[in-house]
Image: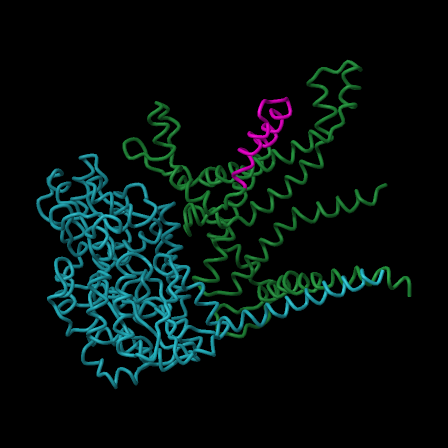
């Protein structure tokens, strides 16, 4: 009898101990106070080919310059940071932020800023004279009431039309379409050959297409005005733009699983066009394993998406300084590397993007990247919707929702109403 | 003293799990319902009590209607499909088959795989490309000359969710088979013999003896499948991701919480999922309690 008693007590105590240990263990693992002096936790979603190599190149520079610090790669896999950002949200809510995390520069950071999760980094801009090396328009677009909350490390272009020259030749399209009208005419010609005129992927790639069509149809100034107090989502110009979107979408093939299979249709000569950001260049061009190993200008080619020549629709990956970072000094040291010419020139050729700085070493950027760098320096700028420059997360989700519903019912009036609502409720 | 000795050790033994369940299950449920009744529509605001406002306004959203619709189509096809297929497999097995153990393992095996892995494979199998662009099942149909069977699978706006249920049926019907097989085996041979002596045909034996005795098994299977189906998330994410065309409440909840950063809306959707699941589970609990009380 007595023994059974003891056993019961022992099990109970053990159970309670496990419970309490769980609480402690979790907390301790998330805020490693003990070695906070040395380790710098850098949170990103760069795990794919190219991007992970770029991060590694920056890491090497960082560790060479800061011998007392070690780089801790807290990258979470998943395209465009879906999973990473969900995990980040829980970490920030539990007040256990990483030392620095990746985010798309611009309105996407607004949620964090409003929640008081981020520290402004104006002091870094002053100290390193970054305002002189980043384009003024970029600084304007990432500032909130005069405060800057991130350090952009690269620039991607969103409004790129990728095409297969062979398919265009076969269809009798002599010139690369420069306006929406020419684009529709070219799509029609391709359709007659039986090939897919326009390859698209899953839902977000349609929003990506929409932003290019809006820019091309409305023009740069009207597009940039959409994100200001003078925005006009309900007017006739917008109706026309959305009708253009509908027309273009009617030439689209079956949606592929993601942007890569859609790009592959173009590379394989099954489809003529796809509109995707310039990360597609790495996929087309890189040797097999990570890429398709195609030759630029012969197997695939590029141009600004129709109607957007002379405008660079940009998005940018950037690093931030969270409030309450366990190792703030380490984070600042990392931001300095991310902002530096050396860091950006090490990172970007590998990632397949161009540096945000104007004084980069142009010899490192060849082929498509040379084009992009030239345009970045000379074009007008516009911000991407899908990649977090102009709209905050809530607004972006509403736009995605509207486009998803539109994909089923193809009702332009309903789409426009939904977009007007989305703009009104964005709280931005 | 002796009485205390009788119940105290048992109580101590279960106390930790009672506490854990009270806090981490029921406490969290309550916290979620409370959150659903506030206007905390971003991560910063405190959120004040608004009653059932969120529960009502959710029905004004087109997306919510679509996702509920999808969940219903998915549930009906999945539960019916898995029950019928599982029953059929168990029935054939029960008829006596050589190498039964091997077949049982084969049919049960899919259950050992996670929905995510199933989804990745079936995403390829159910690719919507047709004719010369076909892969997966459409390619198979194409090369067999069964062209009319090719369709867009889960990308079909009307019946896509029925296609989405196919991997789930594939995964769970083996488990249903195991349940039914145990049920079949639980029917005493004496009863069947007695019926046969009384002049029943084999069909009547099944109709009047075996099937009624399988009712409890069917109910358990229904409960298990039903609650899996109403909260399905991983399969959908693995097959098509966060797209409206295959939206279900659980995916919508993820989008509301992690993409739109709207905790109150997410909590409201979560509450509806819990309520829907309890529609399945509570009648079952009542039923089993009543049955246990009966001598």
Left or right: A406 in relation to B263? left
Residue at 81% x, 63% y is A5
Residue at 44% x, 78% y is A35
Left or right: B86 in relation to A284? right
Question: In the image, which lettered chain appears cyan?
Answer: A
Say which quadrant the N terminus of chain A sits in.
Answer: bottom right
Q: Nearer the viewer, residue B13 or A226?
A: B13
Magenta extent: B84-111
Left or right: B111 in relation to A351? right
Say which quadrant the C terminus of chain A sits in.
Answer: bottom left
Q: Is residue B223 above or below residue A398?
A: above
Question: In the image, which lettered chain appears green?
Answer: B
**Residue A191 at x, y = what percent?**
20, 38
**Residue A17 at x, y = what percent?**
66, 69
Residue at 58% x, 28% y is B89
Which of the 4 image quarters holds residue A231?
bottom left
Q: Is residue B90 magenta?
A: yes
**Residue B104 at x, y = what percent?**
58, 32
**Residue A275 at x, y = what percent?**
23, 52
Q: Is residue A3 magenta?
A: no
Way the structure is coloured:
by chain
Q: Nearer the viewer, residue A109 or A368?
A: A368
| Residue found at the far left of this picture | A174
Which of the 4 image quarters holds residue A71?
bottom left
Tally the numbered discs: 0
């Amino acid at each position: 009898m007595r023994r059974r008693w003891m056993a019961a007590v022992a099990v109970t105590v053990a159970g309670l101990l496990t419970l309490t240990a769980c609480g402690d263990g979790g907390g301790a693992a998330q805020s490693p106070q003990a070695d906070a002096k040395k380790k710098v936790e850098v949170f990103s979603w760069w795990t794919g080919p190219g991007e992970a190599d770029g991060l590694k190149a920056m890491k090497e520079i960082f560790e060479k310059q800061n011998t007392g610090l070690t780089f801790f790669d807290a990258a979470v896999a998943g395209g465009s940071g879906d999973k990473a950002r969900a995990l980040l949200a829980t970490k920030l809510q539990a007040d256990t932020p990483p030392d620095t995390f990746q985010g798309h520069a611009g309105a996407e950071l607004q949620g964090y800023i409003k929640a008081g999760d981020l520290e402004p980094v104006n002091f870094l801009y002053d100290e390193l004279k970054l305002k002189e090396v980043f384009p003024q328009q970029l600084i304007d677009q990432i500032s909130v009431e005069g405060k800057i909350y991130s350090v952009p490390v690269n620039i991607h272009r969103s409004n790129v039309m990728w095409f297969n020259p062979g398919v265009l030749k076969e269809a009798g399209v002599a010139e690369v379409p420069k306006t929406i009208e020419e684009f529709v005419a070219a799509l029609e010609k391709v359709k007659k050959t039986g090939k897919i005129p326009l390859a698209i992927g899953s839902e977000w790639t349609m929003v990506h297409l929409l932003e290019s069509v809006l820019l091309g149809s409305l023009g740069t100034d009207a597009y940039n005005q959409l994100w200001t107090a003078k925005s006009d989502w309900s007017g006739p110009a917008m109706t026309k733009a959305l009708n253009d979107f509908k027309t273009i979408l009617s030439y689209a093939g079956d949606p592929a699983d993601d942007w890569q299979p859609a790009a592959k249709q173009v590379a394989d000569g099954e489809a003529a066009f796809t509109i995707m950001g310039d990360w597609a260049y790495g996929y087309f061009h890189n040797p097999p394993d990570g890429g398709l190993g195609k030759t630029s200008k012969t197997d695939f080619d590029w141009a600004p998406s129709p109607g957007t020549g002379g405008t660079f629709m940009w998005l940018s990956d950037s690093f931030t300084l969270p409030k309450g970072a366990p190792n703030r000094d380490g984070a600042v040291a990392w931001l300095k590397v991310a902002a530096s010419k050396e860091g950006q020139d090490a990172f970007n050729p590998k990632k397949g993007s161009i540096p945000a700085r104007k004084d980069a070493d142009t010899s490192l950027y060849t082929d498509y990247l040379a084009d992009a760098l030239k345009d970045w320096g000379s074009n007008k700028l516009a911000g991407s919707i899908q990649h977090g420059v102009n709209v905050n997360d809530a607004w972006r989700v509403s736009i995605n929702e509207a486009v998803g519903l539109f994909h089923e019912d193809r009702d332009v009036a309903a789409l426009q109403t939904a977009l007007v609502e989305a703009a009104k409720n964005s709280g931005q | 003293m002796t009485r205390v000795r009788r119940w105290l050790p048992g109580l101590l033994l279960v106390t930790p799990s009672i506490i854990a369940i009270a806090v981490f299950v029921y406490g969290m449920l309550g916290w979620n319902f409370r959150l659903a009744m506030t206007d905390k529509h971003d991560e910063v605001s405190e959120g004040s009590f608004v009653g059932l406002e969120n529960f009502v306004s959710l029905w004004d959203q087109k997306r919510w209607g679509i996702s509920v619709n999808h969940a219903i189509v998915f549930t009906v096809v999945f539960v019916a499909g898995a029950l019928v297929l599982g029953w059929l497999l168990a029935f054939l097995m029960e008829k006596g088959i050589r190498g039964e153990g091997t077949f049982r393992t084969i049919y049960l095996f899919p259950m050992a795989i996670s929905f995510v892995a199933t989804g990745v494979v079936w995403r390829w199998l159910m690719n919507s490309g047709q004719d010369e662009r076909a892969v997966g099942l459409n390619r198979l149909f194409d090369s067999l000359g069964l062209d009319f069977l090719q369709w867009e699978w889960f990308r079909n706006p009307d019946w896509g969710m029925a296609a989405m249920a196919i991997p789930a049926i594939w995964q769970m019907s083996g488990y249903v088979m195991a349940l039914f097989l145990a049920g079949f085996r639980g029917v005493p041979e004496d009863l069947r013999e007695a019926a046969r002596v009384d002049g029943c045909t084999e069909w009547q034996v099944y109709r009047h003896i075996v099937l009624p005795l399988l009712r409890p098994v069917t109910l358990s299977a229904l409960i298990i499948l039903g609650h899996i189906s109403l909260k399905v998330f991983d399969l959908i994410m693995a097959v098509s991701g966060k797209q409206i065309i295959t939206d279900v409440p659980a995916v919508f909840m993820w989008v509301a919480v992690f993409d739109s950063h709207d905790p109150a809306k997410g909590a409201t959707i979560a509450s509806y999922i819990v309520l829907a699941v309890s529609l399945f589970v509570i009648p079952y609990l009542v039923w089993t309690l009543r049955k246990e009380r009966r001598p």
